[in-house]
Image: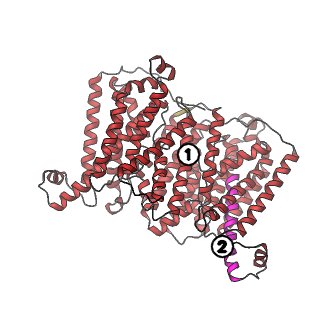
């Protein structure tokens, strides 16, 4: 698959101007960054005039005002400058050496790797100074970047890197979230840190990270000639005498070092490394001084600093002062970056085409029946084990007495709480699997999944919004809010990706961008709400079935039954739609209404599953793929097998989450992410071959 930039209409263009023009633009960027820094210093819980800042610097201000400016405002602005410059240059060099306009510390999962490394350190009770924490973050981020680059490969315009980075990020963040839930006291404050904030308490952090950033910047500036050669291609670079592998490895290490320093100082400030280089790139067509890395990298550093400081200024200008203190700067940059990524996805010309159907295999009816029989037996075993095993082990006789109303109080209490959990996990897994089957068939995209495409994120946003504002909301209310959120995001994603027939790359990129935006908004809601609701929302987001009752299961069960009937009745149309664009039209089928119907049912299934069991990722990706591998492409067989697989997968994940580390518990969503991430990466490797 490949994505290339859309070529503008041919028209006469002026030749790039000389270096003095580039110097003037650089000077203008310096002035902009300086103005934003001054403005940022004047903002806070109490506005400070620029004159008061000058008096504080010269020792003429009131001691209380001087203390605020020196210990808080100036360190915050300095951190914004340092973090923005580091991320801007890191994104620029990563895009150059990978020849990928979407490469950045975010898409390479550097931030997620650093987050997990620091989470592990915190969970083990290590109390480390800032510099040592930077080393741990560097190791985690570098390891994540190496995995993503190794899986994605290189080449202009491919989105494989974004897919690999997103999948690895989801898996690593799931592990970190598990640590947050298991060790809440040791990891206190790590969630807020992960949202990214440049607020500082004195200059200590800035001064400790400054040498690290300087080393990284100096190393990259010394390799600008080799970076320019790598941007031309491996063969061209070798022809110029550049050691390709060694140079690329050195650049990635230095970029990871800069990212680790920024993460250690301010937490993950999202998408700055993605947005800054493309904003500078058009200048290279007008100013010759920006055509090479030695001119474009400083401009990217200044642009990154302007993005971070501008986001902080915008946040404090638009949000009330008492609220803006709690809102991380990274939330604003993530929202801006999500919009930026969606905009890039729309502008890029997708040359991949719709997904080619799987190799035609028609297993015998006996194979299908045997597969269904085995899955039914496995599902029955998972269900029985889920009911009997937990914090207290029961016998089948206890269940029989409970069904007849003759069980004791203790047994009744256990089963009254455990049975709804098991049913919720099974129903949610089946619904997500059916949703993924419908979406993959309609879009003819083997990578389509409710979580990857942002639909689950929209459902989660709607549900979290209700949970944090109306804590007493019941299952039906949460289901309605989740469906509303999923509906809005589905309209956005599928509407923007519809041009050209839901082509793979555009659809996935738009979905990832929308998912990033919903994640930022969810984090904002959790940060602003009270601690009780925040814990409740975090537990729910982990895909937990804790506290579910039978009324909570009813909505997803009803939608699942209706969805199954709908899919079986329209199975022939589903087969035709999944083939190509022409065959359904030749047979007189109207594609647009059919697609809309299947997508609407898929969104409804995903929304009710999220409302019932929280956000559970990768089930809608894994189950349909495994079903097609087992029984072929005909949906009369794929649908029941995928539904059974989804129920077994989530039911098993919920059982393991409740028992492996009992009495502590992990959400089913965390367990499925651990399983789904390697499978997703395996699909990328297979498609690369």
In the image, residue 572 above or below residue 292: below
Q: As drawn, is 398 to the left or to the right of 163?
A: right
Within 10 Å of disc 2 (Cα), the crowding (few <14, some 14-19, many 20+) is some
Residue drawn at (65%, 35%), measured in percent from left and top? 687
Q: Report the magenta stretch's main SS.
A: helix
Q: Residue 2 location in percent, x, y?
A: 58, 31
**Circle 1: element type:** helix
* Residue that mark 2 sits on: 417
Q: Is mark 2 on a helix, strand or loop?
A: helix
Magenta range is: 408-433
Q: Nearer the viewer, residue 580 or 644?
A: 644
Q: Which of the two discs, 2 and 1, labels the residue nearer the N terminus?
A: 1
Residue 30 seen in the figure: yes
| Left or right of 134, for residue 620 | right
Q: Nearer the viewer, residue 230 or 125?
A: 125
Q: Mark 1 — residue?
A: 168
Q: Where is residue 347 in the image (x, y as percent from the top left)?
A: 50, 35
Q: Which residue is drawn at 38% across and 33% down?
A: 280
Picture quadrant where residue 16 is located: top left
Does the CB distance between marks 2 and 1 fall below 8 Å? no
Looking at the image, can residue 107 be seen? no
Disc tally is: 2
C-alpha span from label 2 to label 1: 34 Å
Q: In this view, does 539 lie above or below 372?
A: below
User: Does 427 appear in magenta?
Assistant: yes
Q: Which residue is drawn at 46% across and 25% down?
A: 230
* 177, 537: nearer the viewer: 177
Corner quadrant of residue 307: top left
- Point out residue 408 in the picture as x, y percentages from the top left corner: 72, 83
Q: Nearer the viewer, residue 653 or 369?
A: 653
Please rate how many residues cluster around mark 1, counting C-alpha atoms within 10 Å: few if below 14, some from 14 to 19, many from 20: many
């Amino acid at each position: 698959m490949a994505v290339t930039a859309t070529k503008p209409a041919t028209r006469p263009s002026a030749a790039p101007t000389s270096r003095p023009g580039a110097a003037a633009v650089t000077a203008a960027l310096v002035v902009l960054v300086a103005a934003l820094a001054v403005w940022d210093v004047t903002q806070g819980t109490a506005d400070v005039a620029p004159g008061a800042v000058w008096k504080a610097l010269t020792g003429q201000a009131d001691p209380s005002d001087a203390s605020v400016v020196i210990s808080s405002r100036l360190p915050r602005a300095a951190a914004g400058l340092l973090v923005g410059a580091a991320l801007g240059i890191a994104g620029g060099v990563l895009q150059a050496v990978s020849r990928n306009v979407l490469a950045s510390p975010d898409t390479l999962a550097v931030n997620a790797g650093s987050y997990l490394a620091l989470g592990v350190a915190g969970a083990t009770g290590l109390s480390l100074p800032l510099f040592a924490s930077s080393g741990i973050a560097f190791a985690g981020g570098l390891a994540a970047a190496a995995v993503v680059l190794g899986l994605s490969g290189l080449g202009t315009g491919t989105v494989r890197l974004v897919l690999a980075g997103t999948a690895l990020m989801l898996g690593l963040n799931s592990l970190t979230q598990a640590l947050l839930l298991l060790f809440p006291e040791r990891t206190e404050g790590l969630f807020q840190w992960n949202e990214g904030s440049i607020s500082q308490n004195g200059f200590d952090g800035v001064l400790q990270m400054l040498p690290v950033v300087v080393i990284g910047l100096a190393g990259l500036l010394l390799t600008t000639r080799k970076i320019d050669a790598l941007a031309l291609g491996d063969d061209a670079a070798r022809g110029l005498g550049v050691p390709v592998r060694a140079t690329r490895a050195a650049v990635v290490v230095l970029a990871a070092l800069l990212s680790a320093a920024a993460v250690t100082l301010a937490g993950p400030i999202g998408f700055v490394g993605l947005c800054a280089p493309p904003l500078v790139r058009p200048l290279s067509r007008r100013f010759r001084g920006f055509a090479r890395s030695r001119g474009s990298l400083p401009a990217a550093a200044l642009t990154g600093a302007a993005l971070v400081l501008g986001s902080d200024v915008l946040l404090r200008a638009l949000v009330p002062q008492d609220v803006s203190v709690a809102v991380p700067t990274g939330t604003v940059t993530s929202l801006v970056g999500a919009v930026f990524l969606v905009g890039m996805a729309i502008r890029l010309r997708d040359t991949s085409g719709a997904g080619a159907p799987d190799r035609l295999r028609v297993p015998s009816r006996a194979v299908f029946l045997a597969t269904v029989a085995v899955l039914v037996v496995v599902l029955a075993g998972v269900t029985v084990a889920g009911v009997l095993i937990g914090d207290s082990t029961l016998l089948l006789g206890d269940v029989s007495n409970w069904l007849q109303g003759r069980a004791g109080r203790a047994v009744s209490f256990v089963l009254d709480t455990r049975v709804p959990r098991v049913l919720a996990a099974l129903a949610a897994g089946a619904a997500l699997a059916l949703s993924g089957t419908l979406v993959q068939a309609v879009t003819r995209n083997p990578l389509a999944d409710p979580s990857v495409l942002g639909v689950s994120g929209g459902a989660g946003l709607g549900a979290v919004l209700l949970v944090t504002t109306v804590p007493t909301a019941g299952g039906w209310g949460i289901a309605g809010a989740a469906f509303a959120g999923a509906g809005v995001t589905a309209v956005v994603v599928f509407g923007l990706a519809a041009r050209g027939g839901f082509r793979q790359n555009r659809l996935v990129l738009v979905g990832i961008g929308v998912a990033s935006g919903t994640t930022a908004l969810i984090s904002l809601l959790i940060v602003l709400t009270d601690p009780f609701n925040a814990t409740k929302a975090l537990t729910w987001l982990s895909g937990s079935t804790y506290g579910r009752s039978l009324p909570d299961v009813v909505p997803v069960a009803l939608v699942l039954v209706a969805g199954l009937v709908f899919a079986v009745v329209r199975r022939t149309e589903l087969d035709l739609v999944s083939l190509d664009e022409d065959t359904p039209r030749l047979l007189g089928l109207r594609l647009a209404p059919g697609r809309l119907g299947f997508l609407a049912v898929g969104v409804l299934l995903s929304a009710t599953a999220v409302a019932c069991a929280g956000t559970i990722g990768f089930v809608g990706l894994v189950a349909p793929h495994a079903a097609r591998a087992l029984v072929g492409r005909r949906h009369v067989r794929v649908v029941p097998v995928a539904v059974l697989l989804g129920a077994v997968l989530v039911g098993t994940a919920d059982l393991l989450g409740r028992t492996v580390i009992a009495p502590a518990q992990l959400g089913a969503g965390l367990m499925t992410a651990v399983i789904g991430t390697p499978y997703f990466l395996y699909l990328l490797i297979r498609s690369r071959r």
